[in-house]
Image (spheres, grey):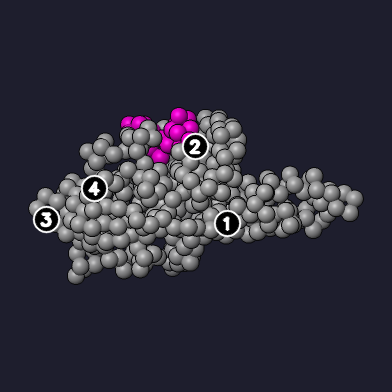
Amino acid sequence: MTAISTDAYSIPEEFQDFRATIRDLVEGVVAPRAAEIDAKGEYPWDIRKAFAEHDLLGLPFPEELGGTGTGTLMLNIAIEEVARACASSALILMVQELGTLPIQLHGTEEQKQRWLPKCASGEWSPAFCLSEPEAGSDPGSMRTTAVRDGDEWVINGTKNWITNATVADFYIVFAVTDREQRRISAFVVEADRPGFSVPKLEHKLGIKGSPTGTPVLEDVRVPADHLIGAEGRGMAVALSTLERTRLGAGAQAVGIAQGAIDYATGYAKERVSFGKPIIDHQAIAFKLADMETRTAAARELLYKACAMADRDEPGLGKYSSMAKLFASDTAMDVTVDAIQVLGGFGYVDEYPVERMMRDAKITQIYEGTNEIQRMVVARAMR
């Protein structure tokens, strides 16, 4: 009979202290910039610099690679705290893991030492290139190819929906290396390689401070030692990465939801209607109570899944999918309700909840759509 752990997770005192430091940083540096970042749609280099100075960019890495060595739970607590104020800024931390985890999980020691310490210090930034115009949820339809030519690989293709496009110093690119068997492989491609370009950035509903683009690779040559893991095993690289990094989308969603609750609650305490604060009206009070309850439940599921990742427990795929699914659906519902609490004021950009709603929507789509997450959970139940 399999033993069942009753210790879902624990948050050590040093994590609580780090969380308090991050919250101070967010309130002092991130929150005042959030509306401007959204309005201008510019990458917040100043916030990235502040994150580096406070060791946040080292959160995804072990100490031996220049990181904090604090693990998955602490990383996602940080993402949550940043997303409470600015979802675009939270993506800086999310892609920091997404674009480097393939190397951490499957790279050689030489590859880890070559690329990861400079990411941990904030000198370099990564990106993750799996999706294509005709291959989003179905990576098996990938058209990008990589052909071996002596000691090099020649890569051709177009990627789509790539976070950190134009910002990243290197990209983890997935390409078909066996056309007959439809096997893919993963490569590190530096941004300054001849033939690599990002000719298009998307104009999006939300997360406007994080560039999303369409990298194009035209006869891009990379050395053979830029292959991550075994040739033809790229799908395993991608899936093992996403199994963990979808927790970042869940953390971002929890943070967005909590930020919306905090603002709506503060507003409801001050807005007077029919002679009393609207929080004293049952219709508003119960709405806020439901928002708080669902977000708390999403956080518990998220933290449980993060702890499973830190302990390398079996069943992580199911729990990370459930956490991402539930948290993102919660964020969308909560932000819509937050707008309703504010009424007409919620619909204008002078107040932050409309931005939070726009930012929340993407959490149901990227890192695997929620339809895909339901498939993962259902398969794990068979």
- Residue occupying the point 35% across, 63% down: 132
Whole-percent x, y for residue 271 in the image: 80, 48
N-term mark: 3 or 2: 2
Counting other residues with Cα less than 10 Å from the Cα at mark 2, is it few (<14), some (14-19), or many (20 or more)? some
- Residue occupying the point 60% across, 52% down: 356
Real-space CA distance between mark 2 and mark 4, rounded to the nearest whole angstrom: 28 Å
Counting other residues with Cα less than 10 Å from the Cα at mark 3, is it few (<14), some (14-19), or many (20 or more)? few
Nearer the observer: mark 4 or 1; the answer is 4
Secondary structure type for disc 2: helix
Nearer the observer: mark 3 or 2; the answer is 2
Counting other residues with Cα less than 10 Å from the Cα at mark 4, is it few (<14), some (14-19), or many (20 or more)? some
Q: For the residue marked with disc 2, what is the amino acid?
A: Ile
- Residue bearing mark 3: 149
Secondary structure type for disc 4: loop
- Residue bearing mark 1: 358
Secondary structure type for disc 1: helix
Counting other residues with Cα less than 10 Å from the Cα at mark 1, is it few (<14), some (14-19), or many (20 or more)? some
- Residue bearing mark 2: 47
